[in-house]
Image (cartoon, rainbow, N blue to C red):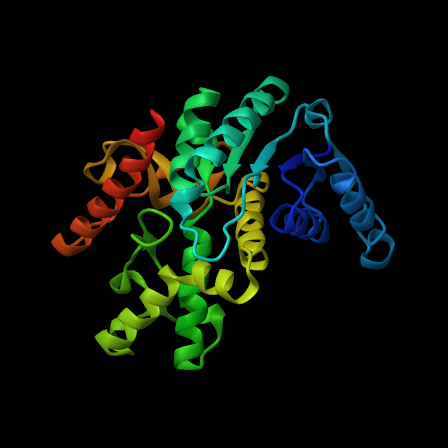
C-alpha cells in the first residue's frame, strides 16, 4: 500500500504544528513547503528527530520547491500574512489573495488529484480563490474555519458548565469571523440543547467570545493562534484520509443550498475520502437564516472585490 502524503504550504506556527500533529497520529508522510530558505527544512528535521522518542515512522521533509510535493493526497494551505493587533481579517485580503493564487497554481501543477484544505485568512474568500484558480470540483476545495469556531464555542460552553468537552457538541455556520452564526438550538451537552442549561444572555456571551476567539488570542500573543487551528486541520485531514464520513462545519462552494449560490461559506458537510461527499441542509428559523445570509453578504463583498 502506497504511503499517504500530505503537503503543508507555510511552515509557520500553524503549518509546523499541523505537521507535528499529523506525525504524532501517524496519518501520513508530510512535506512542509515555505518560501523562506532553511525554515521548512529545519522544522521538518526537528520533527523527524522526535520520531524515535514518540515512536512514529512518518517521513517529514521540508522544501522550498513544489516538485517535492508531487502526488500529494491532501494539500493544506496555511501560507499568508498573519494578523497583527488591530488588523482585521479583511486587511489581509489583497496580500493573501496573491499568495493563495500563486500557491494554488503550483499545487495543482504537481498534485492534480489532491484535496485542498485552505486555512489562510480571510478564510472564505481565500477558499473561493483556491476553488476558482484550481478549477477543481467543489468537493475537493474545503475551507477550515467551522471546526475551529465550533471548538472554541465548545471549549467556552464546557468551561461555563464545568463539564467534559467530550460531552459538548456545538454548531456554527457562516463566514469565519465577526459574522459567524452559532446555532444554540443545535448545540448540545450529552444530547441536551444548551438552551435548556443556560440563559439566553449567557449563550450570547459565549457565542460572542467564540466570534472574537481569534482576536482574543491575537491581543494576548501579538500573533495568530496555532494550537487549536492545527488540531482542527488535522481533524479534517484524518476524516479525509481515513474516509470517516464525519459531519463537520466547513467552508464550501454553495450551489443553491440554504438559498446561497456561487459563494464559499461555512455549512455542515460530510467529509470523507472524496472530500466533501454531501452538503447537509438543516432547517433554520427565520432569524438563523437571516443571520446566515448577512454572513454570506459580508463574504460576498470580499469575493466581489477580488473578482472571484
Nearest the viewer among 86 and 229 is 86
Residue at the spot x=53%, y=53% of the render? 229
Residue drawn 27% across and 64% down? 184
Residue 278 on image: x %, y %? 37, 37
Among the 4 quarters of the image, the one containing residue 172:
bottom left
Q: Residue at x 46, y 55 (%)?
A: 148
Residue closest to the eye, 137 or 92: 92
The quadrant of the picture occupied by the C terminus is top left
Q: Position of residue 52 (x, y in %)?
A: 87, 54
Query: Outermost residue toward the left?
Result: 286
Left or right of residue 214, residue 178 in this image:
left
> Of all residues shown, which one is farthest toward the front?
86
Q: How many marks?
A: 0
Where is 143 relative to 285, above or below? Answer: above
Rendered view: 213 above or below 176: below
- Does residue 99 sit above or below 164 in this rendering? above
Quadrant location, the N terminus: top right
Q: Position of residue 33 (x, y in %)?
A: 68, 35
Task: Please state if 178 lies on the left or on the right of 229 as rendered.
Answer: left
| Residue drawn at (49%, 31%) of the image | 274
Amino acid at each position: 500500500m502506497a504511503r499517504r502524503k500530505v503537503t503543508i504550504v507555510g511552515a509557520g506556527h500553524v503549518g509546523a504544528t499541523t505537521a507535528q500533529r499529523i506525525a504524532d497520529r501517524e496519518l501520513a508522510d508530510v512535506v512542509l513547503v515555505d518560501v523562506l530558505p532553511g525554515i521548512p527544512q529545519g522544522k521538518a528535521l526537528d520533527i523527524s528527530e522526535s520520531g524515535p522518542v514518540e515512536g512514529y515512522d512518518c517521513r517529514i521533509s521540508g522544501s522550498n520547491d513544489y516538485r517535492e510535493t508531487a502526488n500529494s493526497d491532501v494539500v493544506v494551505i496555511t501560507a499568508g500574512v498573519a494578523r497583527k493587533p488591530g488588523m482585521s481579517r479583511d486587511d489581509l485580503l489583497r496580500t493573501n489573495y496573491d499568495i493563495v493564487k500563486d500557491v494554488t497554481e503550483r499545487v495543482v501543477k504537481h498534485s492534480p488529484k489532491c484535496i485542498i484544505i485552505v486555512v489562510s485568512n480571510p478564510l472564505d474568500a481565500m477558499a473561493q480563490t483556491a476553488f476558482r484558480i484550481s478549477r477543481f470540483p467543489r468537493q475537493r476545495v474545503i475551507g477550515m474555519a467551522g471546526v475551529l469556531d465550533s471548538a472554541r464555542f465548545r471549549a467556552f460552553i464546557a468551561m461555563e458548565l464545568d463539564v467534559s468537552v467530550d460531552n459538548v457538541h456545538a454548531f456554527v455556520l457562516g463566514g469565519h469571523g465577526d459574522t459567524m452564526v452559532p446555532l444554540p438550538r443545535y448545540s448540545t451537552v450529552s444530547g441536551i440543547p444548551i438552551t435548556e442549561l443556560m440563559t439566553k444572555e449567557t449563550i450570547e456571551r459565549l457565542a460572542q467570545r467564540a466570534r472574537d476567539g481569534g482576536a482574543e488570542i491575537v491581543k494576548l500573543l501579538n500573533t495568530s493562534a496555532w494550537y487549536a487551528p492545527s488540531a482542527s486541520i488535522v481533524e479534517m485531514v484524518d476524516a479525509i484520509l481515513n474516509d470517516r464520513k464525519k459531519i463537520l462545519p466547513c467552508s464550501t462552494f454553495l450551489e443553491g443550498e440554504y438559498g446561497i449560490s456561487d459563494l464559499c461559506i461555512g455549512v455542515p458537510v460530510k467529509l470523507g475520502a472524496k472530500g466533501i461527499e454531501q452538503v447537509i441542509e438543516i432547517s433554520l428559523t427565520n432569524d438563523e437564516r437571516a443571520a446566515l445570509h448577512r454572513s454570506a453578504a459580508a463574504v460576498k463583498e470580499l469575493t466581489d472585490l477580488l473578482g472571484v
